[in-house]
Amino acid sequence: MNASVSIPSVLNLRPEAEQAPTSGIVDVFSYGRLKPGIIPLWVGEGDLPTPSFICEAAAQSLAKGETFYTYQRGIPELRQAIARYHEQVYRKAFDPERFFVTSGGMPAMQLAFRMLAGNGDEVLIPTPAWPNFAGAITIAGARPVPVPMTIDDKGFHLDFERLEKAITPRTRVLVINSPSNPTGWVASHADLRTALDLARRHGLWIVADEIYSRFIHDPALTIDGRTPSFRDVMEPEDKILFVQTFSKNWAMTGWRLGWLEASPALGQVIENLVQYQTSGTPVFVQRAGVAAIEQGESFLADQIVRARQGREIVGRLSETGLVELPPPSGAFYAFLKIKGATSSKDIAFRLIDEANVGLAPGSAFGEAGEGYLRLCYLRKPEDVEEAVRRISEALPRLVA
């Protein structure tokens, strides 16, 4: 989905390492990150630092000397807190044995693909999609298969006919990311049932990324303050792995803390893989996670309000006549279709130079993203207002 790194063949590296794609998001981020006055809306995080009560929990753990090796599956207190969190959000019981703590959402995803796909296997990814899906699949030795979504004036939609046609005897996994990064698409219960039926018919696993589930903006899709979930439609025997992170809800992107949700029957396999990946997540980081879950609901509520304010402000870009932007139903990204754009990467670089605003190029999210730009609007409203003003002034020059 992105160009691979050029490595001299004389080094004789494994092909899955050589073929790991370069991130088009990081390319733009690296280009503009030190530019004075830049409004950085290119990566998937807000502008608030981690709340003090979370930092204090980590500091107290360090002061107690909790710096030793720990449980590979995560400390019991955090696994229990995660289970309670799910019970509050999904209104049903959850076994703490379903949750496995990881050093971030990416390690959770890598564990999932390590278990499910390898050399010669294929994984279906509806696109545009977060590029790290393809990267994690590639370094596991499998092949990512992009399946373009359809789009109309209401936004993006899964194309189940295309998905089914893309299935081959080598297909092992279907990735479903809802709410979607970068498009803001949210799966309905009907979408989830159809995807699950498809997976059942073909014997596929589903890797479900629902990390933005609390960031829901469409009342028609909102269930008790969250998005529809596979947990609403699945049976205990269904083959679904859920990847999750603390990064988005509680402003903890730099902490590298997440979890993988799976059947307890896979517990020993996952524990073994954690051992050979990180040997466990630092206890003081996990104590911070407990504090985030137990004390962070009001902070998360404020984050959701900020996201909705940003969404409304960004919607004004449609008034330029150069932007197509169906309102995103969830997450905190606007995926802007730039009329007349032939290279989203070129426009992203020029926006840095000429407007001092950093956006991610749509091409970073696969071929289906070309001509788009992704804007993260989880920031204070005045920053989003200023970014929209600068972009609106610059776009006529950039697509002339």
Image (spheres, helix red, strand yellow):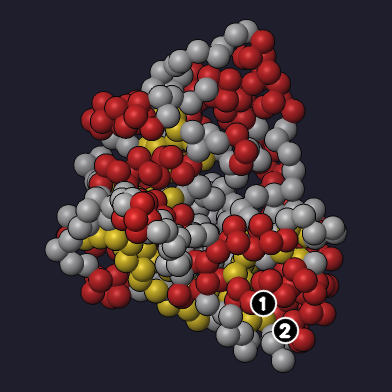
Relative to 116, say whether 134 is above or below. Answer: below
Position of the N terminus, as image quadrant, is bottom left
**Residue 290, quarter of picture:** top right
- Dot 1: within a 10 Å radius of its alpha carbon, few (fewer than 14), some, or many (20 or more) residues? many
The residue nearer to you, when weighing 92 against 199, is: 199
Residue occupying image coordinates x 76% and y 87%: 396
Residue 304 horizontal/vertical position (percent): 67, 49
Query: Which element is circle 1 on?
Result: helix
Q: Residue furthest left?
A: 169
State the image coordinates of residue 342 (x, y, percent, origin top left). 58, 85
Mark 2 lies on a secondary structure that is helix
Which amino acid type corresponds to the residue marked 2 in the rendered image?
A: Leu
Instruction: Give residue 160's quadrant in the image.
Output: bottom left
Residue 27 vs residue 125: left or right? Answer: right
Q: Residue furthest front?
A: 10
Q: Which mark is residue 34?
A: none
The one of 59 and 320 positioned closer to us in this rendering: 59
Percent x, y of residue 220: 53, 62
The residue at the point 45 percent across, 60 percent down is 5
**Looking at the rendering, in which quadrant would you find the C terminus?**
bottom right
Q: Position of residue 66 (x, y in %)?
A: 56, 12
Rendered image: mark on residue 398: 2
What amino acid type should be assigned to the residue bearing mark 1? Ile
